[in-house]
Image (cartoon, rainbow, N blue to C red):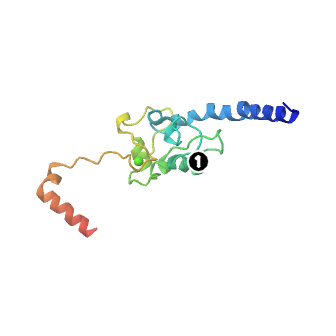
């Protein structure tokens, strides 16, 4: 192995050990910085469910505007502002999908809602279930009323 190759290998090893490894170790903390983050794991923000690599639309939203600092040292700023946005455009806010519609949950608080109700804020096909219609809404009169409302909108 030439001196150049040895040097390159050493630099590469240094990058892998010193540069990338801490990043991989450090970021799982962010799962504890969004409500029900433990339900979704790294997939909450990353395309790869094991974490690292490209971010999904929710992760991009956080990376662009809701970190305390750039890079892996930054913490997620969860609150009303991020909760009211709809990263995947499915009509449900990030907060509704994560069980904290008002964005009042704080890191360290018990997870809001139930794990079964958590949906993916990066996936427009994953949405909270529609509210079950009441008996009145299911009646013929209720259906007519809802049709009229849709026409008027
Ligand atoms: Ca969704």
**Which residue reaches farthest left?**
140
User: Nearest the camera: 76 or 52?
Assistant: 52
Asked whether mark 1 and ligand 1 are closer than 8 Å, the reply comes as no
User: Nearest the camera: 103 or 117?
Assistant: 117
Residue 147: image quadrant is: bottom left
Picture residue at 62% right of the left edge, 33% below the top: 24
Label 1: how many residues lie within 10 Å, few (<14), some (14-19) or many (20+)? some
Left or right, 34 with respect to 126, comes to right
Examine the rendering and report whether any part of residue 102 can be seen. no
In the rendered image, residue 92, in percent from the top left (x then y), is placed at 39, 51
In the rendered image, residue 83, in percent from the top left (x then y), is placed at 46, 48
Classify the position of the N terminus by image quarter.
top right
Residue 139: image quadrant is: bottom left
Classify the position of the C terminus by image quarter.
bottom left
Left or right, 56 with respect to 92, comes to right
Picture residue at 76% right of the left edge, 35% below the top: 12
Q: Which residue is mark 1?
A: 63
**Which residue reaches farthest right?**
3
**Which residue reaches farthest bottom?**
152
Q: Say which element carries label 1.
A: helix
Q: What number of labels is visible?
A: 1
Picture residue at 39% right of the left edge, 42% below the top: 119
**Which residue reaches farthest front?**
1
Examine the rendering and report whether any part of residue 135 can be seen. yes
In the rendered image, residue 39, in percent from the top left (x then y), is placed at 44, 34
In the rendered image, residue 133, in percent from the top left (x then y), is placed at 21, 49
């Amino acid at each position: 192995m030439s001196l150049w190759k040895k040097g390159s290998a050493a630099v590469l090893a240094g990058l892998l050990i010193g540069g990338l490894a801490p990043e991989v170790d450090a970021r799982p903390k962010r799962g504890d910085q969004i409500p029900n983050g433990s339900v979704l794991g790294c997939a909450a923000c990353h395309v790869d469910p094991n974490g690292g690599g490209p971010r999904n639309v929710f992760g991009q939203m956080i990376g662009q505007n809701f970190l305390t600092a750039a890079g892996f040292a930054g913490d997620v700023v969860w609150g009303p502002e991020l909760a009211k946005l709809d990263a995947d455009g499915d009509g449900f806010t990030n907060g509704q999908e994560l069980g904290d519609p008002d964005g009042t949950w704080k890191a360290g608080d018990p997870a809001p809602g139930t794990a079964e109700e958590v949906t993916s804020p990066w996936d427009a096909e994953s949405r909270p279930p529609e509210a079950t219609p009441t008996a009145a809404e299911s009646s013929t009169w209720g259906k007519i009323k809802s049709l009229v409302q849709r026409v008027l909108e």
